[in-house]
Amino acid sequence: PYLTVVDIAGLIKGASKGEGLGNAFLSHIKAVDGIIHVMRAFEDDDVIHAEDTVDPVRDINTISSELRIKDINDLKGVIDGHMKRKIAEAAKTPQSKKRWEENLASYEKILAHLEDGKDARNGMDIWSNQDIDVLNELMLLTSKPVLFAVNMNLHDYKRKKNKFLKPIFDWVQANAPGATIIPYCGSFEDDLIELDAAGTAEKCKECEVVSALPKIIKTAFNMVNLSLFYTAGPDEVRAWIIRKGYKAPQAAGVIHTDFERGFICAEVMAFDELKEKGSETAMKAAGRYRQEGKNYDVQDGDVIFFKFNVTTSSKK
């Protein structure tokens, strides 16, 4: 899996009003697909904290509140602009008027949810299909999936235990149910940066721990609804990243638009099965090499050979 992760400074109280990096920073991260909250769960007098004390639950409450305030302010601006278009939309067609009214109802419903101290992602039991369409357009910060990476000292990371973990777990269960918590040791991961694979393995053996980075990457990859499929030829094997839910022609189009335009079929094997069987020939003998059509949902780990005809033109 491959992710682009942007490391950004932590928010302080009042960021939504311009404190610290302020509104410009909050607006900048609206385009991201997901958020990894890095939570400090270690005490060290040499590492200064903005609040002078270490309290990860206090910190995540501050951050969550600032993100929610930013969403509220942005949504109020959207509603103001929407109200200005009321007369114009009503004058177009009955359908335009109805769509305007439906959007307003969704805006007001989402705003009430946020003002009640709840994140947008935690309203899936109340959002209608119309509300979800509106949320997708708004790209609210609190609608994005989240992962919590808990930074511990090496001693606590080894034993996966310290006084901060239980309060963090309780907070996540109450405020971000379903989100993953991954403990890691930042200083240990930093030591691995300059090491090659052999050096990393030796360091992990010496410290009797494993790097949490692969788990963080894989979890975040799945969190933002990405998946991999592979293509293989005589010269190379290559992984391609797609959104979960892509049909076979869409996945083919990631390689080249001609593949999608002239798509005929996809010959598919599951990577785990291919690894077990050992070869394409063995997969065919076992009846596990199959052809799929244009409605096939590509699965994570599929190995695919696309058949296409570049002379085929799309119907006009």
Image: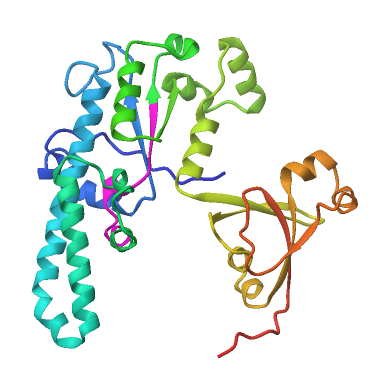
Q: Residue at x 79, y 55 (%)?
A: 235
Q: Nearer the viewer, residue 251 or 11?
A: 251
Residue 133 vertical position relative to residue 197 in the rendered view, above or below = below
**Residue 86's image quarter?**
bottom left
Q: Is residue 246 left or right of residue 149?
A: right
Residue 60 vertical position relative to residue 90 in the rendered view, above or below = above
Q: Nearer the viewer, residue 51 or 177?
A: 177
- Say if the magenta span includes residue 136: yes
The percent position of residue 120, horizontal first and vertical second, equals 27, 47
Q: Residue at x 30, y 43 (%)?
A: 122
Locate the C terminus and report the quarter of the image it occupies: bottom right
The percent position of residue 288, horizontal first and vertical second, equals 81, 52
The percent position of residue 215, horizontal first and vertical second, equals 53, 31
**Which contiguous range is marked in magenta?**
135-149
Residue 253 vertical position relative to residue 276 in the rendered view, above or below = below
Q: How many marks?
A: 0
- Say if the magenta span includes residue 106: no
Q: Nearer the viewer, residue 33 or 200?
A: 33
Q: Nearer the viewer, residue 43 or 309?
A: 309
Locate the N terminus and report the quarter of the image it occupies: top right
Q: Identify the image's colour scheme: rainbow, by chain, secondary structure or one colour.
A: rainbow
Q: Residue at x 31, y 39 (%)?
A: 8
Q: Is residue 156 left or right of residue 303?
A: left
The percent position of residue 200, horizontal first and vertical second, equals 60, 23
**Residue 292's image quarter?**
bottom right
Q: Residue at x 21, y 84 (%)?
A: 94
